[in-house]
Image: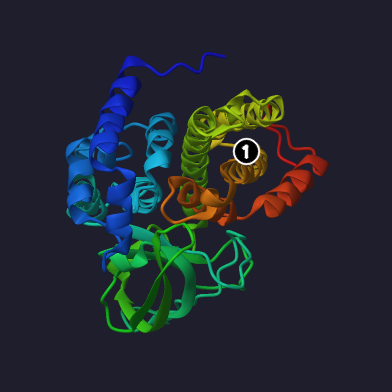
Amino acid sequence: MDFEFSDEQRQLRETLERYLTKEYTFERYRQIRASPEGWDRGVWHQLAELGVLAVNVPTEQGGLGFGPLETLALMDVCGPSMLLEPLSSSAVIATTLLNGFAGDAAVAELLQTLCTGERIAVLAHFESDARSEVRWVSTRAPRSGDGYKINGHKAVVLHANLADTLLISARSVGESADAEGVSLFRVARDAPGVRLVAYSTVGGQQAAEVFLKDVQVPVSARFGAEGKTLPAIESALDVGLSALCAESVGIMQALLKGTTEYLRTRRQFGQPIGRFQALQHRVADMVIHLEQARSMSFLAAMRCTAADRNERRRALSAAKVIIGQAGRFIGQQAVQLHGGMGMTEELVISHLFKRLTAAELMFGDTDTHLQKYAQLTRNGSSIAGNDEP
């Protein structure tokens, strides 16, 4: 299979890579992370000017109308820079989710503003008792007068405190684990009854707990039919998981590059330590894990929009497992080969490892996806086929 990027994909990728290499250095990353805001709106607008925020926006709303493969090309480049801006949260997941409702005039207008960087939207879906199960929604949104009243708690919502608009999933009817009954609502971050508790994650990004108490929204704030939006949420999260896989591979590439450069320059017993055969073997193992992870990230990008939910889920879980295992191995080797320096704040290696560790926990950790993959395999699902289990 040909894994080469097209000329258009390569041009977009190279443009972003040049910008990040020049403007989003490690020192710049540390400055932004140490700032009170924890991100840089100027960088966000520059990403919009480069067309990065328009990748997943339909052409009808002023976007580029691309998809997961172009997203992979960009997220892979973003990995080494460890962007603190809400690229995956807003420009990938939220935008992909909104595309399914672009026929609505209000949604089309929101997509246009997301494309230009004027606004930021974030999906608030996972809950503290869900254990990364997408279908588990305890937040309630019963009918109340001419609209809905939302009550609940969304946990570890990346970039929620940066967003202008929160896309809240809430159950109109049914029990927490039911496949039916989940609706999606557009809620302003500063709406009455919305309370955010913000913090920084181990990977340096901003996140927040979102508490919703008697949040009143009109019917017009609901996306699509009542109780029928869970499939759209699952599909958007699958695209987000694919993007996370690509970003993780980019981080692993940076860890490998930094480690090999250190082995070439660090001298012991009168020669670079990279000449020691035992260390060469460890680097070779890192390369093998990286290439396995890279191939799985391509699989995730190609299958994340498959019509067959079981085919999609099995491929994504397989990718998350292989990439999670590779990330842990490469990260640990990079730190160990740098010695004590590998854990210091002054060295980029420790920050890359932390970001990779945070990524391994997102959308379900390695063990969770290994269990999902095993279950789908037992049920007879096939990556290559379209048979339902």
Residue under the point 43% across and 34% down? 76
**Amino acid tagged 1:** Ala
Residue located 48% across and 67% down the image: 156
Mark 1 crowd level (few <14, some 14–19, many ≥20, 10 Å Cα): many
Quarter occupied by residue 164: bottom left
Q: Is residue 247 above or below residue 3?
A: below
Q: Position of residue 180 (x, y in %)?
A: 57, 62
- Residue at screen point 33% across, 84% down: 193
From the image, tell me which residue sits under label 1.
Answer: 319
The percent position of residue 245, horizontal first and vertical second, equals: 53, 40
Figure quadrant of the N terminus: top right
Say whether residue 363 is visible: yes
Foreground pick, 228 / 27: 27
Q: Residue 104: x and y, percent?
A: 27, 52
Q: For residue 132, what is the image quadrant?
A: bottom right
- What residue occupies the far right of the structure in this picture? 378
The C terminus lies in quadrant: top right
Q: Is 1 left, or right, of 322 in this rendering?
A: left
Residue 346 in the image: state x and y as whole percent. 41, 53
Image quadrant of residue 177? Answer: bottom right
